[in-house]
Amino acid sequence: MGCFVRYVLPYVNYKDEIIKVTLLNIAIIILLFSSPVYAINIISNATADTSSLSVSQLRRIYSMRQVYWKNGTPIVVYVLASKSPLHQQFCKEQLRLFPYQLDRIWNKLTFSGYGVAPIEVTSESELIKAVQSTKGAIGYVENLSEAKDVNVIEVTD
Amino acid sequence: MLTSLKLLIKPFVLMQFYISVLCSFFVVFNLSAAEVKGESLQVHGFVAQGIIDANKSNFINDDESISFELTEVGINASYQINDNFRVAGQAVYLNGGNRYHPGARIDYLLLEWDAFHSEAWQASLYFGRVKNNHWLYSSTRDIPFARPSIINPQVTYFDGFRDLAVGGDGAAIKLKYSDDHLGEVDFNFSRGKSTFSDQQTRVVIGQSGGGKLEHDLDAQASIYWRPLFSQWRFGISANDASFSYSPAEVDNFFDADFIFQFYTLNAIFEGQYWQFSAELVQERLATEGFYIPGFNRDEIGQGYYLQTSYQLTKDLSVMLRNERFYANKDDKNGSKLAASSGGLIPSYFGFHNDTMIGLSYDFSSNLRLNAEYHWMEGGARLSPIVQPDPIANASKDWQVWAIQLMYWF
């Protein structure tokens, strides 16, 4: 309480100061978001027939716990290399997982025989092509303008 | 049916059968990593070579010299036959020095049946040679980049029992459940029989026993739970196995039956920089016969390991681990063991402790270098386990260091 009286109250009396601080905060936020951060879009093959997925559903798909779409089509998961910046951002933002956690799940499946890992492709354009041409495929892209004839999936909370 | 068939076929014939099936599998599909892009067929593999040294112990080799016996190579393939069935197999070549017998093995070769699936449930059955999937790292104990360190925590992943614990010929069931309240729950059950080669029998029994060790069908189960969006995961496992020993015509040992039960409790935390994992272990080893006819011993051993790792930079991490194990909970310092052997077996064979530090550096998504140093104490996890070798392991304290480079695709 003492701190509040000593440090916060004086600012309340100076509206200019409050405006300055607010503007500064806005500037910082704009600066942070104007750094090269990719916008990530989830895309699927037209056969997937799904327009939105919750974060937990998307997580299940990428951790290979849900392997079929609702309409019964098998899901084919495509990814970029685990160290690629887009993959790293996809994991953290869309799945709320660290990339190493997915690596661990996939390695365990692949090298124990109990399942299969997503198919890794080397570039975004290769990933788009794979999603366009593979029945039930899902992937992620930075630039939607290059991804023609695919289904865009909205991710909800 | 499957079991009776296997009893008719000798283990080495079975091994040859597995290898030939896997070879034809590769030949039929004319595989190479670069070609594999299709969704039905996946091929992966790994190559790892290291350098290792154990001081004051025959853990790696008998002359305690610096060794290159740290080789692990493997290739696997998975083919989705249709929506319900998949076949998969992995062949490995392993050389760990004295830790287990060096050579090629069929690690797994199985048919998966996707018995049931919905958005929340996935039920799969596996038939053939299946891996032990019950402990935290049991299914990837030989996979250099998918295990915690070069030398696994011996309290759970005792190298002397590797061939027994890694999996077996039989069947496994895996039930996966996920929802937005409970999180993720996995239930695993398996029944199988491990093949004990003559070389592996020598690793466990020692050179003085010329007989045959047989593994009867064992049963294993485990449950894992990750609360929704949690960075923690918890697990529990139980294993019930029995063995028998048939002595050679001239042998230092006698007919024997062994019961081995193994229970684990584990937790793992996966944070952005910090990771943590731990396993608590309790084992029961009951021996009937073996040393002399009518001999009876029933001991409960206990142990744990705690390990933590911290991501120092994007590519470099450091790991610390502490491990404690005693073979008999009523004789933690091994004094009763020493007394009962008339002083022939030193008391430090009653326990095994390890303090470890390790570094891991990623050159790329598929190339890693691991380095580690172990301060070991005691000989309870040194082979041959049934007849300790106090001459080759004359010191309570011994050390191991290892560096290994690994590549996978």
Image: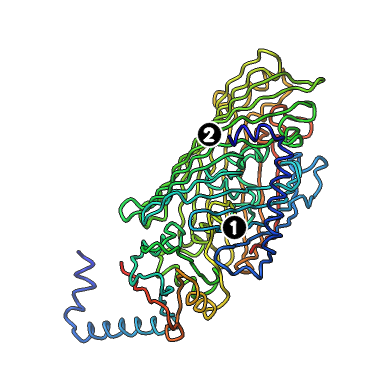
Q: Residue furthest left?
A: A13
- The image's colouring method is rainbow
Q: CA distance from mark 1 to mark 2?
A: 26 Å
Q: Which image quarter holds the C terminus of chain B?
A: bottom right
Of discs 1 and 2, which sits in the foreground? 1
Q: Is residue B354 visible?
A: yes
Numbered mark located on residue B78 in the image: 1
B93 on left or right of A51 = right
- What secondary structure is marked by label 1? strand
Decide: is A85 above or below B60.
Answer: below
Numbered mark located on residue B219 in the image: 2
The type of residue carrying mark 2 is: Ala
Residue drawn at point x = 79 percent, y = 30 percent: B207
Task: Say which of B95 and B108 sits in front.
Answer: B108
| Percent position of residue B262, x then y | 54, 33
Q: Is residue B55 visible?
A: no
Residue drawn at point x = 69 percent, y = 31 percent: B385
Q: How many marks?
A: 2
Task: Say which of B83 and A96 sits in front.
Answer: B83
Decide: is B329 above or below B55.
Answer: above
Residue drawn at point x = 61 percent, y = 35 percent: B193
Q: Which image quarter holds the N terminus of chain B?
A: top right
Few, some or many residues within 10 Å of mark 2 (<14, 14–19, 20+): some
